[in-house]
Image: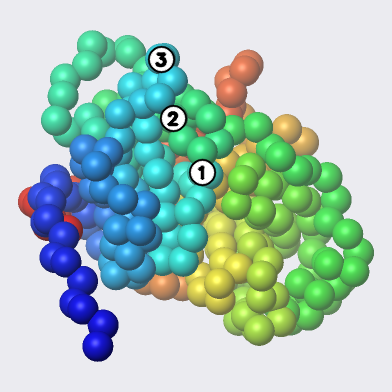
Amino acid sequence: MTPPEAPQAVQTFGFQQVDVFSSVPLRGNPLAVVENADTLPDAKMAALAHWTNLSETTFLLNPSQPNADYRVRIFTPYSELPFAGHPTLGSCHVWLSSRVLPEGRDILQESGAGLVRIRRDGNRLAFAAPDLLRKGAVEPDLLAKIRKGLNLSEKDVVAAEWVDNGPGWLALLLKDRNAVLALKPDFAEIAGIRVGVVAPTPGDDEADFEVRAFSAAGFEDPVTGSLNAGIAQWLTGTGIAASAYVARQGTVLGRSGKVYVTRSDKDVWIGGDVVTCVKGQISL
């Protein structure tokens, strides 16, 4: 008979659940954040991310690089990511909630992808888009597979580009917002591929582009910072978009996420509001 496992000591951590890319609760992309998680084992991090079943759960730790303000680890329900956009802004929002920094001071977040610079503009946060790890045209065979999975013809796709800054995104540019909103993806056909779709929204007072994100795991993501960062570098770099624009995402899912893009001489900034929905403690 196998002896029972010895009980493990329970630890208590600060915990917040925030909504990112929205100033209104329940309209953006939710994120769970565990504070001061240096003593939490990797297995417990992974188990909690699986339990929350959110697209990402993050853990704030002391930095290992001298210039960083804090370190973040980002977990999906099934794996760890080196970088993701809405967890970057949401984690920074939680980190800032327990401290006061001088106005105008940028925050340096350490992640698996390196240091990410974050700035504050009133209540809004923005991160400097990391360099693309892969860019350029999507291979014809892969593009044909994606078109089949999205039920698109060759003439429906204006352009297609790799916009991978870590998670593996590629993006399709369509003609208009209605074409984006009408998509009904066959997730079995595009399994294992992260596909973003974007189109201009002329005459729309709230947003300049409509975006949707189809994950490699078979679901649609409500509002996606990493995808929007890659798309922004592509669109502003080629002149398809102006140096400042607003992207809307999540419409089909009943969300109303807003991503505020600004291109400066050196960086493309990806901004959004963050609102706290749950704040307390979690025992693990």
User: Regarding mark 3 in the picture, which secondary structure is present there?
Assistant: loop
**For the residue carrying disc 1, how many other residues have a C-alpha within 10 Å: few (<14), some (14-19), or many (20+)?**
many
Residue identifier under label 2: 110
Q: Quadrant of residue 29?
A: bottom left
**For the residue carrying disc 3, how many other residues have a C-alpha within 10 Å: few (<14), some (14-19), or many (20+)?**
few
Residue drawn at point x = 24 percent, y = 42 percent: 39
Number of marks in the rendered image: 3
Q: Nearer the viewer, residue 212 or 1?
A: 1
Residue 189 numbered tag? none
Q: Quadrant of residue 186?
A: bottom right
Identity of the amino acid at label 1? Answer: Phe
Residue identifier under label 3: 66
Question: Residue 140 placed where, x, y %?
Answer: 91, 64
Instruction: From the image, state whether disc 3 or disc 2 is nearer to you.
Output: 3
Identity of the amino acid at label 2? Answer: Glu
Q: Residue furthest front?
A: 1
Question: Tags 1 and 3 in contact by the CB under 8 Å rule?
Answer: no
Residue drawn at point x = 66 percent, y = 84 percent: 188
Residue drawn at point x = 12 percent, y = 51 percent: 11
**For the residue carrying disc 2, how many other residues have a C-alpha within 10 Å: few (<14), some (14-19), or many (20+)?**
many
Q: CA distance from mark 3 to mark 2?
A: 10 Å
User: Regarding mark 1 in the picture, which secondary structure is present there?
Assistant: loop
Q: Is residue 252 above or below residue 1?
A: above
Residue identifier under label 1: 83
Q: Is residue 190 above or below residue 32?
A: below
Q: Earlier in the sequence, mark 2 or mark 1?
A: 1
Q: Earlier in the sequence, mark 1 or mark 3?
A: 3
Horizontally, is 7 left or right of 107 in the view? Answer: left
Q: Is there any visible trace of residue 106 in the rendered image?
A: yes
Q: Is there any visible trace of residue 272 in the rendered image?
A: no
Question: Residue 224 placed where, x, y %?
Answer: 49, 53
